[in-house]
Image (tube, rainbow, N blue to C red):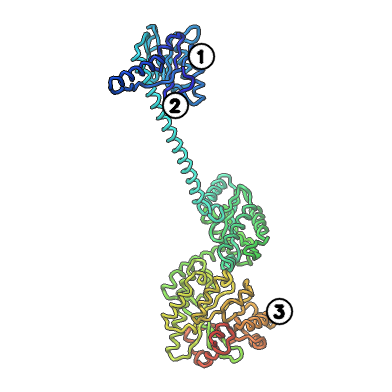
């Protein structure tokens, strides 16, 4: 008999103690020399008489033999290990001296539960129901009575091997489907975990976001209420973060936020929660029980952790936090109240000098509520035409006349009266209204300048302030061009003022924008010079016309020689770069006299006039304003700017 199965041919196992029986099975199911000779004879005979050869389509099987049950079980085990299991087995019912047929079948199914079995017996002393009851099932079992007919053996072999093959295919398909389902389920579970993480964590820092924060505080509330403990909610806000964002760009700001998140996480315990509330605000929930002293100690550790400098874009940055703390149950018994009171305490810390800690006290949230109301009113102020422009002359230091002015926005609130820009401009930047407000200022200044010309007054150059976010928005040049066109105002009568930090946020991009403005004929001034991160190499390349000295250098210029030296150095630097210099915040005659000595070109301040409404400024124009020839003379001769130099050529 074959020792190795033929590929594709079902494997059969005959277990019988009678050697002759094995030969009978081989004659019926296998390939013998006698059969091969008979087939060869029939083929030759057909060829002799010119008849077609009929080829038998009999199924072929690979047959192995075992003479005792133990031997048969071992062959089945070995076939499984080799990966070529038997399809079926013919098992004799009686095989002394070893196992009988039923015991052999029990062991066979214990090794290979899928093998099909035919019981071969010459005796009728076995009841079918008893056999089924002992073996447990009948769907893989047939009984063949000896002596058997060849056709019966062939039918059993063909049917049961086909059944075994089909069941094996089905099991393989089911296993494949189960693997596919398992893989897809694992993928869905991973995607679900990722989505759940994204829904509850900040994408930039990886910290819990507001959704998860609310859940953590709610858990702390439940625990603290049950155990009658207190806990603290601490709100940390980075001081002057907006300046870093505006001057160095959002990439630098993101890097700083990630570093802050890492430092805060290292300060607290594992049971505490550090979350990012939004922008530059972080929340720390100190799990119960937490005393006031414990919270203040943690807050001090936060301040100390923030002291080491952070290196970003080649610049050393020192970031400090303002921290507000609210306690359960003294300061609130809900998520919203605790966060609101911690925010009010943080705001108080900023007002009292920044880089400090304040615990909530009654009345602190009055300022926060007022800020919310003011923001709500700010959203409707533009539509209701509540803004107006005031104008402050830029006076020639030597002659005392003027031919230009700075347009400064004011908000005439229906209930609060005239609101200072210091009160609402930072709020407009926070809530995203600075762009529309800035565009209104630009258009109104152009309209008013042209209106004065049409009224017969000599032309005046009007300077408008451009916020850093406007400068980076990408459409500044087009907005200015459209505003000038709509007002029918020449570009030389418009000046834009940009802060030092705004133009230095992206120097190369700033150069492109400034060059376009200069080509249009618009003058450009760098405002608050001396307070940012100027690079002399870039300053030399910027197509700008004026430097405006920040008022902080003027307040004590007559009393402190250092301030006078700084102003003198700025004037000298600007003149060497062919730029004009304007000093802000001049309030006394002594300050003005010193500026004359230092060679400053122009000044603004209460020494000459505060910012005034358009009607009052018109009166100033009629009285003190230099004539049109003076303005032309300023453009062509007195200006040391690179723009004027190009025009002369």
Relative to 519, is 577 on the left or the right? Answer: right
Mark 3 and mark 2: Cα distance apart in space: 100 Å
Q: In front: 450, or 169? A: 169
Residue shown at the point (49%, 19%) measured from the top left: 3
Q: Where is residue 130 in the image (x, y as percent from the top left)?
A: 40, 11
Instruction: Note whether residue 330 is visible.
Output: yes
Residue at figure coordinates x 55%, y 59% from the top left: 341
Whichever of labels 2 and 1 marks the residue nearer the N terminus, that label is 2
Tell me the number on the disc at residue 7.
2
Residue ID for mark 3: 562
* Badge number at residue 70: 1
Front of the two marks 2 and 1:
2
Tags 1 and 3 in contact by the CB under 8 Å rule? no
Q: How far apart are marks 1 and 3 (CA)?
A: 108 Å
* Mark 1 or mark 3, earlier in chain: 1
Find the distance from the CA under tag 2 to the CA under tag 1: 26 Å
Secondary structure beneath label 1:
helix
């Amino acid at each position: 008999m074959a020792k190795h199965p033929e590929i594709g041919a079902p494997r059969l196992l005959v277990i019988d103690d009678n050697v002759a029986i094995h030969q009978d099975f081989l004659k019926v199911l296998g390939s013998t020399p006698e059969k091969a000779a008979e087939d060869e004879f029939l083929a030759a005979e057909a060829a002799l008489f010119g008849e077609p050869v009929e080829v038998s389509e009999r199924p072929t099987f690979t047959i192995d033999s075992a003479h005792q049950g133990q031997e048969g079980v071992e062959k089945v085990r070995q076939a499984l290990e080799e990966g070529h299991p038997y399809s079926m087995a013919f098992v004799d019912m009686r095989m002394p001296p070893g196992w009988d047929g039923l015991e052999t079948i029990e062991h066979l199914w214990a090794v290979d539960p899928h093998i099909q079995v035919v019981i071969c017996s010459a005796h009728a002393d076995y009841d079918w129901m008893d056999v089924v009851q002992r073996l447990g099932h009948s769907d893989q079992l047939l009984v063949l009575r000896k002596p058997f007919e060849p056709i019966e053996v062939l039918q059993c072999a063909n049917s049961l091997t086909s059944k075994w093959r089909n069941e094996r295919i089905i099991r393989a398909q089911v296993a494949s489907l189960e693997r596919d389902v398992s893989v897809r389920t694992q993928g869905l579970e991973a995607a679900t975990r990722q989505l759940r993480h994204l829904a509850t964590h900040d994408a930039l820092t990886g910290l819990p976001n507001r959704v998860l924060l609310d859940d953590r505080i709610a858990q702390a509330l439940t625990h603290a209420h049950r155990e009658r403990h207190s806990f603290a909610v601490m709100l940390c806000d980075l001081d002057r973060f907006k300046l870093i964002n505006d001057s160095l760009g959002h990439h630098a700001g993101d890097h700083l936020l990630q570093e802050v998140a890492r430092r805060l996480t290292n300060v607290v315990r594992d049971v505490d929660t550090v979350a990012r509330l939004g922008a530059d605000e972080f929340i720390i929930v100190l799990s119960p029980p937490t005393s006031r002293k414990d919270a203040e100690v943690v807050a001090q550790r936060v301040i100390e952790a923030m002291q080491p400098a952070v290196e970003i874009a080649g610049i050393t940055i020192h970031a400090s936090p303002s921290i507000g703390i609210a306690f359960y149950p003294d300061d609130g018994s809900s998520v919203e109240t605790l966060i609101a009171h911690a925010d009010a305490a943080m705001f108080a810390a900023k007002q009292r000098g920044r880089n400090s800690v304040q615990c909530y006290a009654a009345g602190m949230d009055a300022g926060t509520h007022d800020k919310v109301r003011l923001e709500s009113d700010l959203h409707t102020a533009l539509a209701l035409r509540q803004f107006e422009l005031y104008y402050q002359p830029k006076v020639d230091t030597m002659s005392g006349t003027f031919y230009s002015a700075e347009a400064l926005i004011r908000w005439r609130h229906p209930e609060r009266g005239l609101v200072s820009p210091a009160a609402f401009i930072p709020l407009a930047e926070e809530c995203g209204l600075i762009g529309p407000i800035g565009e209104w200022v630009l258009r109104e200044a152009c309209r008013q300048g042209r209106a004065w010309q049409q009224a017969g007054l000599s032309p005046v150059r009007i300077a408008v302030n451009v916020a850093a976010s406007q400068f980076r928005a990408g459409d500044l040049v087009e907005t200015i061009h459209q505003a000038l066109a709509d007002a029918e105002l020449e570009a030389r009568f418009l000046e834009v003022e940009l802060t030092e930090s705004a133009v230095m946020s992206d120097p190369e991009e700033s150069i492109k924008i400034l060059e376009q403005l200069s080509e249009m004929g618009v003058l450009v001034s760098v405002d608050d010079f001396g307070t940012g991160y100027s690079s002399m190499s870039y300053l030399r390349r910027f197509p700008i016309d004026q430097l405006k000295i920040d008022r902080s250098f003027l307040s004590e210029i007559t009393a402190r020689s250092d301030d006078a030296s700084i102003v003198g150095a700025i004037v000298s630097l600007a003149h060497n770069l062919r730029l004009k210099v304007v000093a802000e915040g001049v309030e006394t005659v002594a300050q003005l006299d010193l500026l004359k000595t230092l060679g400053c070109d122009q000044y603004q301040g209460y020494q000459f006039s505060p910012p005034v409404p358009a009607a009052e400024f018109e009166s100033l124009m009629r009285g003190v304003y230099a004539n049109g020839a003076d303005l032309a003379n300023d453009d062509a001769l007195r200006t040391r700017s690179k723009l004027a130099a190009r025009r002369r050529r």
